[in-house]
Amino acid sequence: MRLTVIGTGYLGATHAACMAELGHEVIGLDVDAGKVAALRAGRVPFHEPRLAEILARHTASGRLRFTTSYEEAGAFGQVHFVCVGTPQRRDGDAADLAYVEDAFAAVARHARKGALLVGKSTVPVGTAARLAERHPVEIAWNPEFLREGFAVQDTLRPDRLVFGVRTARAERLLRSVYAPVLATGTPLVVTDFATAELVKTAANSFLATKISFVNAMAEVCEAAGGNVRALAEALGHDDRIGRAYLRAGVGFGGGCLPKDIRAFAHRAAELGVDLGFLRQVDAINMRRRDRVVDLARELCGGGVLGARVAVLGAAFKPDSDDVRDSPALNVAARLELEGADVTVYDPEAMDNARKAFPLLGYALSAEEALRGAELVLLLTEWRQFREIDPVWAAGLVARPRIVDGRGVLDAERWTAAGWCFRALGGPPPGRNAATGSPRPTPAPRRADGSAGR
Ligand code: UDX
């Protein structure tokens, strides 16, 4: 089939490349000529495993092209996927729909007769119906659930497909587009516009709620001397609860969960439904960042003024270079404001971090960030950080003190290597981090044999 993908950001670039991979002829459109030029040259402007390879293969074969022209896209496509962003509005929690509205208007103006316009962007419920009223074209809604770092896999082998349609013809067209995906047994839910829009916001709200639930349990563990890692593991063995999204830590960030739960609560309130618990989910999430700042102050003897702090991680999660609403950078910036001398290192997100927070200090490696540090904060759980040898690291820092903000390090091992170790949701100092039971703390030692603290 001949498809177009309007908007070549994270979602659009991935969708365009994956649709070509499924065998379709695809034109990706963006109003940003710079993005189009980069994609034409086979350059992916963000870190996403496998995407560059798929993009290069199909731009070379001619099956995937990019343009800035709505005339060209309109004349070409049988089905147009709208994948533009819906950022949070500057004046509040609502989603800004300007890009979606502009894209639908422009495609509707140039589309061939009988073309189907499919929205993929995350929008407030009611948007598709309004667009259908406004434009004399057929519309469908097909939400996208891809995670950064797994975008290709999530698009080619999704957990489910959701089609919000008003006609059998729209359903038929979408079934043809996704025929190779459906052939592998992918579950399909065919429903109305409103439900299709809601599935996306409900899914993100549920995931955010799970994370904030476990982070609230972390707060209780901190107060009661429990251990949230053991608690989450025990909860996760219950199939009704499941293990996923129960990792306690500095909380969720990124371009989706934070803005989506705020926009959803806002939209529900407009409809007269109070989703106040989502505001709690948001508040618990933000409190985790405060907690890391508090722990940093505590470990530095009451304040961080003048302290050399190494922050490991800048991306909002590992295997991504995205720093939007990154808990790691938020904490780093707050410590810098309190007078700490902060050095950040991230394996992939350095350029984006520098652009977003130009005043922070940056290192070219974890080793460089650790050298001379008086406090280490692990805030994005990249594999290379999880695998740091505590004995080696103790030999680099000025003072072996660490906060594991993602609950991924082995507390016993780090403590045995002489570190003053604190984790979010971990027991207070002097208790066994694995069991929560009291135990003697070994005298901290540096790798070079000198006294640790
Ligand atoms: C999310 C949804 O997963 C995806 O379905 C939707 O399409 C877009 O939003 P993404 O933003 O890429 O995807 O990130 P995700 O992997 O879901 O992680 C979100 C945040 O939650 C990250 O900051 C991550 O560190 C955090 N997280 C995740 C936790 O703190 N604990 C967990 O157990 C899981």
Image (spheres, rainbow, N blue to C red):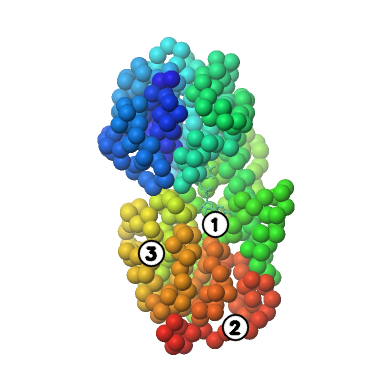
Other-residue count near label 3 (Cα within 10 Å), few / some / many at <14 / 14–19 / ≥20:
many
- At label 2, counting other C-alpha atoms closer than 10 Å, the crowd grade (few under 14, some 14-19, many 20 or more) is some
Of mark 2 and mark 1, the one earlier in the sequence is 1
- Which residue is pictured at 50% across the width and 67% down the height? 293
Query: Foreground residue, 319 or 374?
Result: 319
Name the residue type under label 3.
Answer: Val
Mark 1 CB lies closer than 8 A to ligand 1: yes
Q: Label 2's element?
A: loop
* Residue located farthest toward the bottom when viewing the structure as drawn: 450
Tell me the distance, in whole angstroms, between the alpha carbons under discs 1 and 3: 18 Å
> Could you say which is closer to the camera, residue 383 or residue 77?
383
Q: Position of residue 382 (x, y in %)?
A: 46, 59
Q: Is residue 452 left or right of residue 360?
A: right
Tell me where residue 227 appears, x and y as whole percent: 65, 67
Please name the amino acid that badge 2 sits on.
Answer: Thr
Quadrant for residue 395, please give it.
bottom left
Look at 39% across and 47% down and name the residue there.
47
Dot 1 amino acid type: Gly
Which numbered circle lies on residue 344?
3
Between marks 3 and 2 in the image, the one whose residue lies nearer the viewer? 2
Q: Is residue 189 above or below residue 376?
A: above
Q: Say left or right for 158 vs 342.
A: right
Q: Which residue is mark 2?
A: 441
